[in-house]
Amino acid sequence: MPARPLVIRGRALAQGRLPAICAPLVGATLEQLLDEARVVTALGPDLLEWRVDFFGAIADIRQVLAAARALRDAAGGVPILFTRRSRREGGQPIPLDEDRVVALYQAVAASDCVDALDWEMESEPRHLEAVRAGAAGLPLVLSFHDFQATPDDAALAERFDRAARLGADAAKLAVMPRSMHDVARLLAATAAASERLAVPVISMAMGPLGAASRTCGGAFGSALTFAVGASASAPGQMPIADVRQAVGALQRAMDVPPVA
Amino acid sequence: MPARPLVIRGRALAQGRLPAICAPLVGATLEQLLDEARVVTALGPDLLEWRVDFFGAIADIRQVLAAARALRDAAGGVPILFTRRSRREGGQPIPLDEDRVVALYQAVAASDCVDALDWEMESEPRHLEAVRAGAAGLPLVLSFHDFQATPDDAALAERFDRAARLGADAAKLAVMPRSMHDVARLLAATAAASERLAVPVISMAMGPLGAASRTCGGAFGSALTFAVGASASAPGQMPIADVRQAVGALQRAMDVPPVA
């Protein structure tokens, strides 16, 4: 089957073309977050990812909800992916245990101020189940990050499949390549998963070696690429304008009808 | 070892960064060829490829030599790769047998009006040997094209290796992908060959599916990408400006210092 775009609030991102461009927001204070959101939104991303693990007041649920509301207004209609990245998978240290993080997800989802949720597929089943049950209809990205290496081919396929099996609305893998062969393997695994699974897949090879995956991943079936508006949230993210130009060039080239 | 740039007249193309950008010239008359050369040269390619099989007067060696001289002047210092693509590998029909094509190569090389030669590694050994012997010191790209499919992994590796074994100064493979998996395989084979061989490698996956190889191939070790200045010479070639932007974005992200 053809690779699928992310659908949020009933609309396919980027008019259904792959990949949509997502810009991370990493503000530590409400003021920084909103300033960042305004700067980044002006660059025209298809999606914003609020990396709430960077938010200093993450332990105060009322402040988080107030920030979500203010962010929704600042985003001017650009949908928001709500993400707490765990320390284990490359996120910031936070003063919350997993039960409280789950409660935060449920409250934010219920507030309807964000449009999608990211949760790590490696988390405990009961936490994953609680996030899914409390998603209030929002699409759930189940993600996996390896900042050390690129799992072997079988493990890459298994990760994509596991996300789908666990009920993901999108399956996301971010890996660290140690060679360009690793990057090629990630692209191949992405192409295969995008044909095999009924949900969108998202992938990226991080760091300098992985840059090609951020501009070309969409051609291999990745529904989303992360690009820098104001600040990067992971190694290797490129500026939005660079990614948009490269993606646009590829899309124009791939639209050409096949030559006999 | 690190991937190698093409070196022509003692200088690494594109300051040693991968990939250099090559624009094909496909004019049928001298006037068309020179007009095309002026238009294309203004776009700043690193290399021009004169596809002499498109040249109507190819059977008249004096006209070919005169065109080579005029082309050298029109190219304003951009080096010229001289290529007769055979019908079997996607070129135009020409009224010359292989012995006369070899004689044409020898005469053009001796004229010193071009800077590199492309010859197909599938040609008869005696012809290949004659071209190599008559190359007059010009670098020799030994090429292989498959317009139907992408050979399997072992065959891709063998083709790269064969070119090197046959004395190529650069080994070029152009294949037709039938899936994005084929594109990923070509990129992996390119990365491996660029690490294994002592000469530069050049690769591309043709057609719309292969577009990613034209913008990202350099990251995987390909020394050259073909892009359209005025007219395409193979399916899937993208505009020079698009390729340059995409390549530049990747190079900035990968922060690769020049090799030479």
Image (spheres, coloured by chain):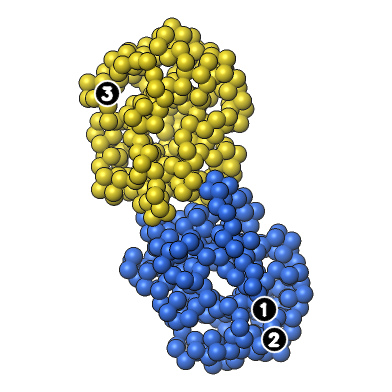
Chain colours: A yellow, B blue
Q: Chain of mark 3?
A: A
The correct choice, above or below, for B67 with respect to B22 in the image is below
The correct choice, above or below, for A135 with respect to B165 in the image is above
Mark 1–mark 2 Cα distance, whole angstroms, equals 8 Å
Residue at 54% x, 54% y: name it: B215
- Identify the amino acid type marked 3: Leu
Residue at 76% x, 78% y: name it: B70
Mark 3–mark 1 Cα distance, whole angstroms, equals 65 Å
Q: Which residue is mark 1?
A: B114
Circle 2 residues within 10 Å: few <14, some 14–19, many ≥20 = some
State which quarter of the image contains the N terminus of chain A: top left
Determine the residue located farthest toward the top in the rendered image: A62
The percent coordinates of residue B66 (x first, y second) are: 74, 84
Pick the residue in front: A88 or B13: A88
The correct choice, above or below, for A165 with respect to B17 in the image is above
Q: Are marks 3 and 1 in contact (CB under 8 Å)?
A: no
In this orientation, does residue A101 appear? yes
Q: Which residue is mark 3?
A: A128
Q: Are marks 1 and 2 in contact (CB under 8 Å)?
A: yes
Q: Chain of mark 1?
A: B
A139 sits to left or right of B92? left
Q: Secondary structure at mark 1?
A: loop
The dot on residue B111 is 2
